[in-house]
Image: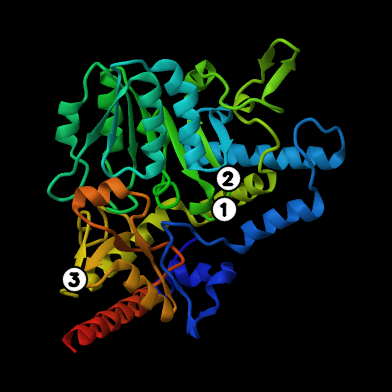
């Protein structure tokens, strides 16, 4: 897909997203909550519906036509994921319900079996709850110690502190690629290199990066990577774990049941080859096929093009937000081209609760998020009860940012007038 001088990427793709063409409270919908979940194009919706209408069947073990067709589509989607992130093998891609399940898979299968008292797990204060709570379970069960990297004055990952924090007792480093609150892009390739120098494994939470920028797991040299389909134009209930082949081969199954077995006897069982040993039970077949369609859609646009366009939106969003004196934005500032951070902004407004802001903006048809964004430790670290967050995607445009900014100004003026009275 090639942009022209007169058409933006959003101009080209918006017709693909039926949900965007509606009114909310009598106002045109402006959907700016993409870090929470993305919207779905028609090609993805049709792929999901076609499965249930035309060849709904269980996969792998059926001998009939529908089962073969479903299996082919389901496994073709796995191939698309592997290519999309440049995995070395399709066996390195494990379907999960979401990134949370993928992290739990690693925590229970690898963490519980490889960590012991005194071993160290390094996280950061900006992690999503999904990349904290499972490791708390592991630490409590094994006696491993959790350590946390803090922030620089610019509210980014403190790499120098990380270098001092890591030791030969560190067995795992698990870090988010892009913070869903600060928007900072962490130096994960360097983090992985340092972790490996100390003999530690590196897990990358890529939920906020896979939908927005090209990802190459071999270049990043992460040991595991997790992502959720619903943030990348696919349905809910489907995500994936990437793991280096040797690591996955060494890890025991996470869940037991059908599909993940080779042979079952009354007193023992043997397990299926990768990746199926981690995929117990009937999977989310239609959702996986739709995830493959979402990857086709993103690939057709081009991840480089998506990243470049969203950088333009980021530059414009920050240009507008920084002109409002009551607003405090968290995380690093983008450069003049919108590079250096993600296309989102978590902010507070002086004297106004984030939930009140979001509620009144909703009355103007503008959907943003408010609260702690599943990063309560980060908000406590910053001394905040919550923030408002606006997050963009490639189907958003400059006009929608203008609607948001004008509605935000009107909302702040309303609160100012109430307090003045």
First along the sequence among labels 3 and 2? 2
In whole angstroms, how far apart are the C-alphas of marks 3 and 1?
37 Å
**Is 247 on the left or on the right of 312, as rendered?**
right
Frontmost residue, 182 versus 275: 182
Q: What numbered label is drawn on residue 350? A: 3
- Please report the residue visible at 51 percent of the width from the left and 22 percent of the height from the top: 248
Frontmost residue, 370 versus 84: 370
**Is 350 on the left or on the right of 314, as rendered?**
left
Classify 112 as above or below 135.
above
Frontmost residue, 178 versus 382: 382
Q: What numbered label is drawn on residue 238? A: 2
Q: Position of residue 219 (x, y in %)?
A: 37, 32
- Quarter location, residue 366: bottom left
Report which residue position mark 1 lands on: 234
Q: Where is residue 188 in the image (x, y as percent from the top left)?
A: 30, 36
Q: Indicate the secondary structure of the residue bearing disc 3.
A: loop
Classify 266 as above or below 165.
above
In whole angstroms, how far apart are the C-alphas of marks 1 and 2?
8 Å
- Please report the residue visible at 48 percent of the width from the left and 53 percent of the height from the top: 231
Q: Position of residue 386 (x, y in %)?
A: 29, 59
């Amino acid at each position: 897909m090639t942009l022209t001088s007169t058409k933006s990427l959003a101009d080209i793709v918006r017709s693909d997203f039926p949900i965007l063409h509606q009114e909310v409270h009598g106002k045109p919908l402006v959907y700016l909550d993409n870090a929470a979940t993305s919207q779905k194009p028609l090609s993805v919706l049709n792929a999901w519906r076609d499965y249930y209408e035309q060849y709904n069947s269980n996969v792998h073990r059926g001998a009939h036509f529908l089962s073969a067709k479903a299996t082919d589509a389901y496994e073709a989607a796995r191939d698309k994921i592997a290519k999309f992130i440049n995995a070395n093998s399709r066996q390195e891609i494990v379907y999960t319900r979401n990134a949370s399940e993928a992290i739990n898979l690693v925590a229970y299968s690898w963490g519980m079996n490889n960590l012991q008292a005194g071993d160290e797990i390094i996280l950061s204060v900006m992690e999503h709850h999904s990349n904290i709570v499972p490791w708390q379970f592991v630490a409590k069960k094994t006696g491993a110690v959790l350590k946390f990297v803090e922030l620089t004055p610019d509210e980014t990952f403190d790499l120098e502190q990380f270098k001092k924090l890591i030791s030969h007792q560190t067995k795992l480093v698990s870090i988010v690629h892009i913070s869903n609150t600060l928007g900072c892009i962490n130096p994960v390739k360097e983090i992985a290199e340092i972790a490996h120098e100390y003999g530690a494994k590196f897990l990358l939470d890529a939920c906020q990066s896979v939908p927005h920028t090209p990802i190459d797991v071999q270049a990043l040299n992460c040991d595991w990577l997790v992502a959720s389909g619903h943030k990348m134009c696919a349905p809910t209930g489907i995500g994936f774990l990437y793991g280096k082949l040797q690591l996955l081969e060494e890890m025991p199954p996470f869940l037991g049941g059908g599909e993940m077995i080779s042979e079952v006897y009354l007193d023992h069982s043997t397990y299926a080859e990768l990746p199926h040993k981690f995929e117990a039970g009937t999977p989310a077949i239609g959702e996986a096929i739709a995830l493959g369609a979402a990857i086709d859609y993103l690939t057709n646009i081009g991840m480089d093009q998506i990243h470049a366009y969203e950088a333009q939106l980021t530059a414009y969003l920050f240009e507008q937000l920084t002109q409002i004196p009551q607003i405090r934005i968290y995380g690093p500032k983008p450069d003049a081209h919108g590079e250096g951070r993600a296309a989102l902004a978590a902010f507070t407004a002086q004297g106004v609760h984030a939930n009140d802001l979001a509620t009144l903006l909703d009355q103007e048809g503008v959907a943003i998020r408010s609260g702690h964004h599943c990063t309560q430790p980060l908000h406590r670290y910053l001394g905040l009860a919550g923030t408002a967050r606006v997050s963009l995607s490639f189907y958003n445009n400059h006009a929608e940012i203008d609607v948001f900014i004008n509605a935000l100004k009107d909302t702040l003026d309303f609160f100012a007038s109430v307090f003045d009275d």
